[in-house]
Amino acid sequence: MTVLHPLRLGMNIDHVATVRNARGSAYPDPVRAAKLAEEAGADGITAHLREDRRHITDADIDALVEHLSVPLNFEMAATPEMQAIALRHKPHAVCIVPEKREERTTEGGLEVAREENSLAHFIAPLREAGSRVSIFIAADRAQIEAAHRIGAAVVELHTGAYCDLHAEGQFDARDDELKRLTEMADFANHLGLEVHAGHGLTYDTVQPIAALPQVVELNIGHFLIGESIFRGLKPAIHEMRRLMDEARG
């Protein structure tokens, strides 16, 4: 029988900064949201410092590093600028994600297999600095194998397609995507990679992913920030935590 390990919740606070930046004000404060998330039971905080600084800023990262008592998962593109910032702060985890200026949100997984050599050299200093390196990828065997070869400790499987298909009512296609996520989580675990998952997860879609025994962490942000308008941030996180724990059984 497969043993289900405790499932961690990583709270992404990017879109607190999105709301703040819409008015160019000092509020709402992403660090305050991160501390509330800690109090509500989040196991870690995720923040994506984009090249264009559309939400999280350098000052936000400085403040998070100073004030958090749970691990920081620093999402970033594979650029020299971001590598230098990560090496300066040495966060608990660094998640390498694809990034395009014109996209609204991260549209897919990183192309690791095609950029294997350059990514291996890029992440080596991060590993040496003590950060756990995660690669955000589609549930694809070739990408998982490449992530393993370059020395990543973690793969985070992109759940966006699964969530979009559910929202569109394409349930057969959704179930096919869930099957692919299930198989690839097992494959990554078999290679010795720690498996995370995230992107687009809601109360309606989280439980089938939370039930996957190989997945040890979910990273969720946009939905919880939106839901907090109606419930408050702590109750929104409590409900997500309840659903995750219920699915874990």
Image (spheres, grey):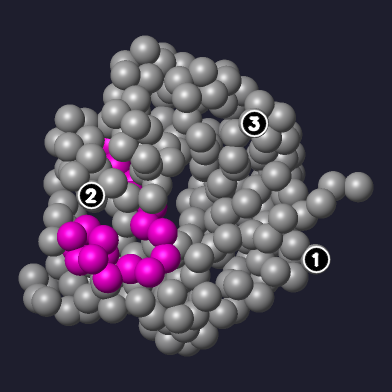
Q: Which of the 4 image quadrants contains residue 188?
A: top right
Between discs 1 and 3, the one toward the N terminus: 3
Residue reaching furthest left? 24
**Residue where numbered disc 3 is placed:** 192
Between marks 1 and 3 in the image, the one whose residue lies nearer the viewer:
3
The residue to which callout 1 is attached is 249
Residue ID at (22%, 76%):
29
Amino acid tagged 3: Gly
Task: Find the distance from the CA under tag 1 to the CA under tag 3.
Answer: 24 Å
Q: Which residue is mark 2?
A: 89
Q: Amino acid at mark 1?
A: Gly
Residue drawn at the location 13% of the way across and 61% of the way down: 59
Work out how far the residue at label 2 is from the one at label 1, CA to CA, in angstroms.
Answer: 37 Å
Identify which amino acid the numbered label 2 is placed on. His
> Relative to residue 243, is residue 134 depicted above or below?
above
Range of residues picked out in magenta = 60-77
